[in-house]
Amino acid sequence: MPDRFDVGRLEAARTAADLSNEYDRIADSYDSVLIDEHQWRAPEIIAGIAAWLLPRSARILDAACGTGLVGASLKRFGFTDVHGLDMSRGMLAVSERKQAYRTLANAALGGPLPYRSGEFDAVTISGAFTPNHAPPESLNELVRATRPGGYVIFSLRSDEPPRGFAAAIGALTASGRWVLFKQGAEFQSMPLVEPRVRTRLHVYEIADAHSKK
């Protein structure tokens, strides 16, 4: 029987290695617990936003793709040029089975990413911007990898905002690297099991180089 998803254990991870190991442990039960029991719907919503904004030929990076929930939703919308990245090899193995990605890379957010500047029309991030997960420095590389006029679409924990994200978002805005396109209302992201957890979705548009301050 697969090991069970446990929000508390994820939030208690002290190092990136601990976090990756925990995700490896729960990879095979992740979808059934998070979707069926926790009613986590952010991946569907993020994919729907991408479908509203982008042509189906768009090249998309699904950062911290996990088991491929966003990728699978993007595939249902008809996107065919989607690429995934995650720190957990166990999660990537599950993601690969969904056959929703052209490529999958094993790397952690927060450091340099193996992509060219402006390579993607959009970047999606679902669930990684939460306490003890991806650091706020992640945003710099994700913005770099997105073309001018493209979008960074992400969920951000709002009931317990992870440290540094407000400052990082503000710095990118102040420097003219992106502009706020849309911010959603706060919602209970896992209402049946973790009603305390609240999330807000954000869409930022990458600025043209000549418009930067």
Image (cartoon, grey):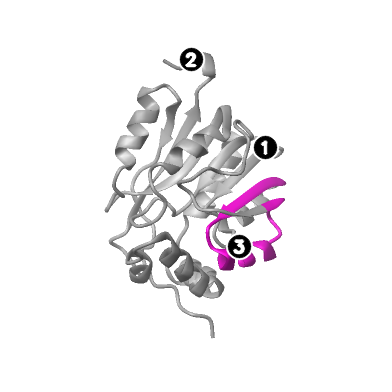
Q: Is residue 21 visible?
A: yes
* Amino acid type, residue under disc 1 in the picture: Ala
Please rate how many residues cluster around mark 3, counting C-alpha atoms within 10 Å: few if below 14, some from 14 to 19, many from 20.
Answer: many
Question: Which numbered disc, 3 or 1, marks the residue that appears first in the sequence?
Answer: 1
Please rate how many residues cluster around mark 1, counting C-alpha atoms within 10 Å: few if below 14, some from 14 to 19, many from 20.
Answer: some
* Amino acid type, residue under disc 2 in the picture: Ser
Would residue 90 be found to the left or right of residue 197 on screen? Answer: right
- Say above or below: 207 vs 78: above
Question: Which numbered disc, 2 or 1, marks the residue that appears first in the sequence?
Answer: 1
Q: Residue at x 62, y 42 (%)?
A: 60
Label 2: state its secondary structure. Answer: helix
Residue 182: say if magenta. no
Would residue 19 be found to the left or right of residue 112 on screen? Answer: left
Residue tagged by mark 3? 92
Which residues lie in the magenta part?
79-103
* Amino acid type, residue under disc 3 in the picture: Leu
Question: Which numbered disc, 2 or 3, marks the residue that appears first in the sequence?
Answer: 3
Q: Quadrant of residue 68?
A: bottom right
**Alpha carbon of mark 3 to alpha carbon of mark 1: how far?**
22 Å
Name the foreground residue: 72 vs 87.
87
**Alpha carbon of mark 2 to alpha carbon of mark 1: how far?**
23 Å
Q: Residue at x 62, y 40 (%)?
A: 115
Q: Quadrant of the N terminus?
A: bottom right
The mark found on residue 58 in the picture is 1
Return the x and y of residue 141 as percentages of the image width and height: 50, 38
Residue tagged by mark 2? 211
Name the foreground residue: 21 vs 91.
21
Name the foreground residue: 25 vs 54.
25
- Say above or below: 175 vs 19: above
Q: Nearer the viewer, mark 3 or mark 1?
A: 3
